[in-house]
Image (cartoon, rainbow, N blue to C red):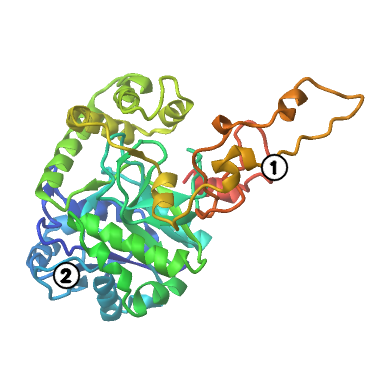
Amino acid sequence: MSQVKLLLLATNEEVSPVSAVAGMPALSYYMLALRSILRLQPYHDRVFILSNERNHHDLLSWANSKLSDGFPAANILNNGKRGGTCDLFSDVGYAIQTAKLDDSHLIIASLDVLYHPYFNFQRIVEHSIIRAKDTVVFHRPPPGADVSSLALLDLDDFSLTASNPRVLATASSPSGIADGITAAALAPLMVIRKSSLPDLFLSGPSTSLSSAHQGSTHASSQVKQLATLLQDRLIAVGKPVYALELDFCMDTSTSSGLEAAETFYIALEKKTDVDGPVGPAAQALQEVSEAAVSLGVVSRGDERIEGLLASCSAPKKAFLNFYASNWRPAVKEAPPPVTVSAMQAVVSHSLAGTLPDRFADATIRRHNPRVQHPVYQTTSNDYGLKKPTQVEMPDTYAGASQHFSNTFYGGPSKVSCMVTAVTTSKVHKALNEF
């Protein structure tokens, strides 16, 4: 069994990681998720918590209580900081050198965010370790969510059923609002292989992290710094990074975010305790569809909404309803900003460029009509003989590598209606359905 260690970051200056959420400390939700991961047991040499001067005493009190599930107090590290800005690079580097975490694969998770109460942490670990991949976690922000405090990912497959897409690029300073379907936001949870740790955290400090330090919240600053590190030290040099999707991610690094998470957890617990059906899935996502339509993102009956409807889990449906009922009125009153998707965000922050001349001016485009067989002729060839006009030219252009090239991004190569490649083995199917 491959050895792996876990580092939990509890360096928030505003909210304590042991703050109560629905009657239980926020840290205890992570401990519940760790019970099923045999690779991280026993805790005394595989799970560590990095704290600061402000919350170190709170964590020690939590470790000595029954709520800690036997977590050793000696594994709570203290970086000695009080106040100041978030510095993910130095914090993780300090923990790696202090606890000697560079002798195995490392899972890094921030306690400034919460997922649904019983999220499958084991699935993330097994995917990464068995497949030997550097893996990050992402979520789809609900329609109307401001992405300026997030870091977006550009994935190589926009299919709703893609279980483990590759990350092509990151955008640490996006703008606009999410469409709820294609935008993929980075979460502060990743699994880094042993061979990638020196390149990511043990080499010299990165000068590009200075702009990423300025986040509106602690969790926002962490994900922006993480996106910058991944882009500069792994993706830019050609090292593969893959992603797994979780239902949602709630920022609890502020008092308002913690209050919202507690309200949602209580509502979710009441919803799951009710006997009988809770209604069709279409009713659960009605608010999401209406928000997307009102913002001009999609039209009614769009197949992407139908795909999202079919792929949503019960916790995500509850989160989308909770978000729509609490924040949607403010979105409606505000002027509609520019919507953003994963592709648009990364392209807007990539190398500057314009449309190729053959698209910017249709009159200079070389037209090569196909010569038809003299016997086997079709009426559709008449359309190909016509020279295209400027109206038929594309208004945006981006290659699959996010740079201007001579190829279009054709979308995913696999379709659900037919087999276009070698079928997935039973082992990989079991991992996808883990």
Up-down: is 81 above or below 288? below
- Crowd rating for badge 1 (residues with CA inside 10 Å; few <14, some 14–19, many 20+): few
Up-down: is 37 above or below 5? above
**Which image quadrant for residue 214?**
bottom left
Tell me the residue at 37%/57% (across/down): 37
Residue under label 1, please give it: 366
**Which image quadrant for residue 388?**
top right
Q: Position of residue 314 (x, y in %)?
A: 34, 32
Tell me the residue at 71%/38% (across/down): 367
Residue 357: numbered disc = none
Residue 332 falls left or right of residue 397: left
- Please say whether residue 293 is visible from this viewpoint: yes
Residue located farthest toward the front when viewing the structure as drawn: 363
- Crowd rating for badge 2 (residues with CA inside 10 Å; few <14, some 14–19, many 20+): some
Q: Position of residue 231 (x, y in %)?
A: 41, 63
Residue 228 falls left or right of residue 8: right
Residue 255 falls left or right of residue 432: left
Which element carries disc 2, helix, strand or loop?
A: helix
Q: Are marks 1 and 2 in contact (CB under 8 Å)?
A: no
- Please say whether residue 123 is visible from this viewpoint: no
Q: Position of residue 130 (x, y in %)?
A: 51, 60
Q: Considering depth in this image, is 249 or 331 the residue closer to the camera? A: 331
Gap in angstroms between the C-alphas marked 1 and 2: 71 Å
Q: Considering depth in this image, is 298 or 242 the residue closer to the camera? A: 298
Residue under label 2, please give it: 73
Residue located farthest toward the right when viewing the structure as drawn: 375
**Closer to viewer: mark 1 or mark 2:** 1
Q: Position of residue 419 (x, y in %)?
A: 67, 37
Tell me which amino acid carries mark 1.
Arg
Which element carries disc 1, helix, strand or loop?
A: loop
